[in-house]
Image (tube, rainbow, N blue to C red):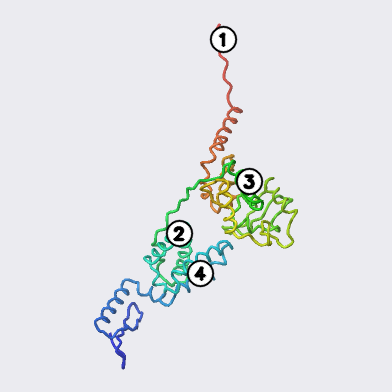
Amino acid sequence: MYKRKGSDIWRINIRHDGKKIQKSLKTSNKKLATAAEAKVRTEIVEGTYYEKLIGRNKTFKDLMDKFLKVHAPKVSGNMQRSYRTSLNHLDSFFGKSNLLSIIPRNISKYKMLRNDEGAAPATINRELAMLSKAFNMAVKEWEWLKDNPVSKVPREKEDNERDRWLTVGEEVSLLENCPEWLGDIILFNLHTGLRQDELLSLIWDRVDMFRRTILIADTKNGKPRTVPLNKAALGILESKAGIISIRSRIVFHSKCGTKIDKHNLRRAFVIAMGKAGIEDFTYHGLRHTFATRLAQRGDDLYRISKLLGHKDIKTTQRYAHHCPDSLRVGVEMLEVGCNMTAVPKKEAIPSA
């Protein structure tokens, strides 16, 4: 340790593996300076000191600014909106924090805060997933840090086994207790399985009445998909096509011709459910009902997966237990084949 001429502050000058480290210990107390020097030397030996040097001047804001600039353009519009929503919550907690101060303990505190605010486990996990993705890029691509602190924090346990769908009776009651504009949306959702934002963002330019299809260009997994229309869904579009507003290209629009706010939609949906006496059901359950009914009617999981726009068929496998009859059809097809190729029984030889 040494002091510069005219200064009372202790400094160190250390060489290790060909690297020179010069820094102020920020104290004039020799005992404290000695302890600080010992800590630096320990970190050098353990290999953690240079990690601090790399990310020392980087903040949470630096991390997220670069992440959104580099990574966000590569994902779908829906995912970008999800990133912005997650960032609002993360930023309110981490703010201008130095990256080195974002350690597993602080991330766990963030989880506790979000739980206290009533955030769903899936929401918290989505926020942590974005944060983890950003830290992974900081480690692997930008070399700002050595480790990803989010990887050491356990995720919230989610209840992914929710299996609630509308019965036919509930559907009739729901439609009887909602305004016409909401009824059209509910029916269209039950016959197409669209995600909420996919339906609310649907424009006439992506409707092909001749081919009876709609194009969903902006999807959750980033891959556009074409959804066929059955008679019920087509009938809804035909009735709306007769009164297309010149003010709007949006199929299901507000009275002002603008996109319906999702919060207003959910509020109206909850009111209609209350009037219909339906409990324990969410708007997303309409999409789930669509898939469940297909499975119950014997449609195969691959086709259901394509209609729903699932990136991985594993996501669709939750509906497998709804289609035992389709499995029965499969084995019964073997019976048909056996009957065609079966060796006829030999007639008994008459006794003499």
Instruction: Tell me what residue is drawn at x 60 percent, y 30 percent.
Output: 336
Percent position of residue 28, x then y: 28, 86
Q: Quadrant of residue 265?
A: bottom right
Instruction: Tell me what residue is drawn at x 32 percent, y 83 percent.
Output: 26
Which residue is denoted by mark 4 in the rendering? 67
Tell me the crowding category of disc 1: few under 14, some 14 to 19, or many 20 or more residues within 10 angstroms, Cα based. few
Q: Which mark is in front, 3 or 4? A: 3
Q: Earlier in the sequence, mark 1 or mark 4?
A: 4
Percent position of residue 332, x then y: 57, 32
Q: Earlier in the sequence, mark 3 or mark 4?
A: 4
Name the amino acid, label 3. Answer: Glu
Tell me the crowding category of disc 4: few under 14, some 14 to 19, or many 20 or more residues within 10 angstroms, Cα based. some
Does residue 339 sit above or below 199 in this rendering? Answer: above
Residue 142 marker: none
Q: Which mark is in front, 1 or 4? A: 4
Name the amino acid, label 2. Answer: Gly
In the rendered structure, the answer to whether residue 250 lies left or right of residue 347 reads: right
Whole-number angstrom distance, CA of label 3 to CA of label 2: 33 Å
